Image: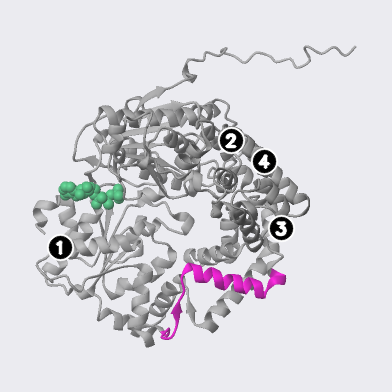
């Protein structure tokens, strides 16, 4: 690698660091990856033994990419023995390499699926305890892992994961009630693991860190084989990972790269203080900064810098654009999600048609994939190809698939997958029974009407109900929206029961969206074929884009709709951040908790800094009006409508260009003083 040509001064200084431990505090888009690669290459070029350099990353993909790029930058075979791994796989390697040292020679590593199997087994063996809890095995495992990763006790872990951090009397009472039973199950799970000689993923880190912490001999042994530890995404390390890293302060040289302002995984236990307080935590450490941003234009960075400056946490970060000036970011006020979605679709199609941009030049970011359901419906309808990162596609959500299974069998009575889904939806019909019923229908080969077959195969009232439903839906074959309506009416009780945990908050509202989407198709076949398969790239006859445009669009050319959490490391020419509204930034869940508010700020920071040239932020005017009706909190920390903490409150005029589509809330002129309201008027009591 030609270091001097490919690195800027700040990067070069970090790469050539000759002290003991270094934290490279790298802002967004400042070339973290490039720096860590160059550091490894530099060390090897200057005589370090590659087998004594370890690179640690959060994903296998990142580890491979870094190692490959280091090797590519070196003369042949020089970096051959360089090792890059995730925390887990590295610990696993150490356990295998030093079977006696870590005492886990004959243990088997189990993956999350196996863990779940084991926890289910344990729950089954303790059914009298388990049945008292309304907590699923996966949630038990989550609590167990959270406690071990964050080093919080069981009570606090239950509070964080099961009760969203609530601290009121009711919660206290409930935690006290369920904790002993959770403890019994977790202890039983631990015992079972030990008996069967299993190590779960967290055990890998624990086995290594516990031994290294307690055993000077172990540290000495390891230091003979390790000179440099290079850690990427340091801000995402959690207390358990920190515990693993701390013995290495003594064992070797640490070179950690991270951005405290991009730490957004505290729900998994990540602790940005590992970066923020690096110097206090690591003796003989220095901190260098990278502030030259290669990704975005200065206007985009100005908004991002402003956001961080307003934080009570002193990030002390001012990103400067190497690329210089560009377009001022846009702040778009919309009055609802449909308007927002259609505006976004228009914008993308305009960019695609008039500005020579690809679909893949667009990255759409949202806090949750759930929020993007309307956008996805509009994209499907307007034939904008897209992929989603993080969360599930709207039409792949279980509750939607349940309902759609009925439409699928009406459309195609040979659709076996849909039959099983539809039949098992009903209480009392399991998979075995469903296959039997289905066999009857398929064997008939279309000679008899399906409702009659259903009634014959399912005795009693249930059979009549299911047969009638099929019949009612079938009758409306031309009106897809109506079919959704009928299906929903018949299935909503069952759906509400099946998804009772998050029915009201999350799932219920999807059905009106499904209906609107269905309404926009003139035949069931088209709806199922296009809408549900969601093969937007392969569609023909686009009413919005001409066929030739579609044909030339490459298969992999699609808009990315991503949750912000899944967008780390991504970048795009045009970046649209959805719904940066008072109740979501910070989220109304966060208002009681300063740490949560600041985490939300970092989430927004990550989103804004993905944009290269064009940044568009949308917000809902419905939530903006909440600002005007804000309730003053009686005491600090009391939940309000978020107006005080809303991140974009008082954003300076020049930083963004505001535009309001539809209803213009700014032009409403109200009376200067509140008039008296008389509720006794209009009532005659005589
Ligand atoms: N010295 C440099 N000269 C030219 N381009 C650079 C330099 N350093 C980094 N870049 C480019 O800047 C872009 C951002 O780099 P990179 O993705 O490594 O940033 P990052 O710090 O990991 O960003 P983030 O944390 O925001 O994901 C890349 O396209 C990279 O090639």
If you read the primary sequence from the N terminus, does the residue marked by circle 2 or circle 1 appear first?
1
Q: Which residues are magenta?
A: 103-129
**Callouts 3 and 4 close, C-beta under 8 Å:** no
3 or 2: mark nearer the eye:
2
3 or 4: mark nearer the eye:
4
If you read the primary sequence from the N terminus, does the residue marked by circle 1 or circle 3 appear first?
1
| Residue 634 visible somewhere in the drawing | no
4 or 1: mark nearer the eye:
4
**Callouts 2 and 1 close, C-beta under 8 Å:** no
Identified at 34% across, 77% down, the residue is 93
Cα separation between marks 4 and 1 = 65 Å
* Quarter in which the N terminus is drawn: bottom left
421 w.r.t. 648: above or below: below
Cα separation between marks 3 and 2 = 28 Å
User: Tag 1: Cα neighbours inside 10 Å, few (<14), some, or many (≥20)?
Assistant: some
Residue 455 position in % (x across, y down): 72, 50
> In the image, which disc is placed on residue 471?
4
Identified at 25% across, 79% down, the residue is 225
The residue that mark 3 highlights is 428
User: Tag 2: Cα neighbours inside 10 Å, few (<14), some, or many (≥20)?
Assistant: some
SS class, disc 2: loop
Residue 530 position in % (x across, y down): 45, 40
Mark 3 sits near ligand 1, with its Cβ under 8 Å away: no
Cα separation between marks 1 and 3 = 61 Å
SS class, disc 1: helix
SS class, disc 4: helix
The residue that mark 1 highlights is 72
If you read the primary sequence from the N terminus, does the residue marked by circle 4 or circle 1 appear first?
1
């Amino acid at each position: 690698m030609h270091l001097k040509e490919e690195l800027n001064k700040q990067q070069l200084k970090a790469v050539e660091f000759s002290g003991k431990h270094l934290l490279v505090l790298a802002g967004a888009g400042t070339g973290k990856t490039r720096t860590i690669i160059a550091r490894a290459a530099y060390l090897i070029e200057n005589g370090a033994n590659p087998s004594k350099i370890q690179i640690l990353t959060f994903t296998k993909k990142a580890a491979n990419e870094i190692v490959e790029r280091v090797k590519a930058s070196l003369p042949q075979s020089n970096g051959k023995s360089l090792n890059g791994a995730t925390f887990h796989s590295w610990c696993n390697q150490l356990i295998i390499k030093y079977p006696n040292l870590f005492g886990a020679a004959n243990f088997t590593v189990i993956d999350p699926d196996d863990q779940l199997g084991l926890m289910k087994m344990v729950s089954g063996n303790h059914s009298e305890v388990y049945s008292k809890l309304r907590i699923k095995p996966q949630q038990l495992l989550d609590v167990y892992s959270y406690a071990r990763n964050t080093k919080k006790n069981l009570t606090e872990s239950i509070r964080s994961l099961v009760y969203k951090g609530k601290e009121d009397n009711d919660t206290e009472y409930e935690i006290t009630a369920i904790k002993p039973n959770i403890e019994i199950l977790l202890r039983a799970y631990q015992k079972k693991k030990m008996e069967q000689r299993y190590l779960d993923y967290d055990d890998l880190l624990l086995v290594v860190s516990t031994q290294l912490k307690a055993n000077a001999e172990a540290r000495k042994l390891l230091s003979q084989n390790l000179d440099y530890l290079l850690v990427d995404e340091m801000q995402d390390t959690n207390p358990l990972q920190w515990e693993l890293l701390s013995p290495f302060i003594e064992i070797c040289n640490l070179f950690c790269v991270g951005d405290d302002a991009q730490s957004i995984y505290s729900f998994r236990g990540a602790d940005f203080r590992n970066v923020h307080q690096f110097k206090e935590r690591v003796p003989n450490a220095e901190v260098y900064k990278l502030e030259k941003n290669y990704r975005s234009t200065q206007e985009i960075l100005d908004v991002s810098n402003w956001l961080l400056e307003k934080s009570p946490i002193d990030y002390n970060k001012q990103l400067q654009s190497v690329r210089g000036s560009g377009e001022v970011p846009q702040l778009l006020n919309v009055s609802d999600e449909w308007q927002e979605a259609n505006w976004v679709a228009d914008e993308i199609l305009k960019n695609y048609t008039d500005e020579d941009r690809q679909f893949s030049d667009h990255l759409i970011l949202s806090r949750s994939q759930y929020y993007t359901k309307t956008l996805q419906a509009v994209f499907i309808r307007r034939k904008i190809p897209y992929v989603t990162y993080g969360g599930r596609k709207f039409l792949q959500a279980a509750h939607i698939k349940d309902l759609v299974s009925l439409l699928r069998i009406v459309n195609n009575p040979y659709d076996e997958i849909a039959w099983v889904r539809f039949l098992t939806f009903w209480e009392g019909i399991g998979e075995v029974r469903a296959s039997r019923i289905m066999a009857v229908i398929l064997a008939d080969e279309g000679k008899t009407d399906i409702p009659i077959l259903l009634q014959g195969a399912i005795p009693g009232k249930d059979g009549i109900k299911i047969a009638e439903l099929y019949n009612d839906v079938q009758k409306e074959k031309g009106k897809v929206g109506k079919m959704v309506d009928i299906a929903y009416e018949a299935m909503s009780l069952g759906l509400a029961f099946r998804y009772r945990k998050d029915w009201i908050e999350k799932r219920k509202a999807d059905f009106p969206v499904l209906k609107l989407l269905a309404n926009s198709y003139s035949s069931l076949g088209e709806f199922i074929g296009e809408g549900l398969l969601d093969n937007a790239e392969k569609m023909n006859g686009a009413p919005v884009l001409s066929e030739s445009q579609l044909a030339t669009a490459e298969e992999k050319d699609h808009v990315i709709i991503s949750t912000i959490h899944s967008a780390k490391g991504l970048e795009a020419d045009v970046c649209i951040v959805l719904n940066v509204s008072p109740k979501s930034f910070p989220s109304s869940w966060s208002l009681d908790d300063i740490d949560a508010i600041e985490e939300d700020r970092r989430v927004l920071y990550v989103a804004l800094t993905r944009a290269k040239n064009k940044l568009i932020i949308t917000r809902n005017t419905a939530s903006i009006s909440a600002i005007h009706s804000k309730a003053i909190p009686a005491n600090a920390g009391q939940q309000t409508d978020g107006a005080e903490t809303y991140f974009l409150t008082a954003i300076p005029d020049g930083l963004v260009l505001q535009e309001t589509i539809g209803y213009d809330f700014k032009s409403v002129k109200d009376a200067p003083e509140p008039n008296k309201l008389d509720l006794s008027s209009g009532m005659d009591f005589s």
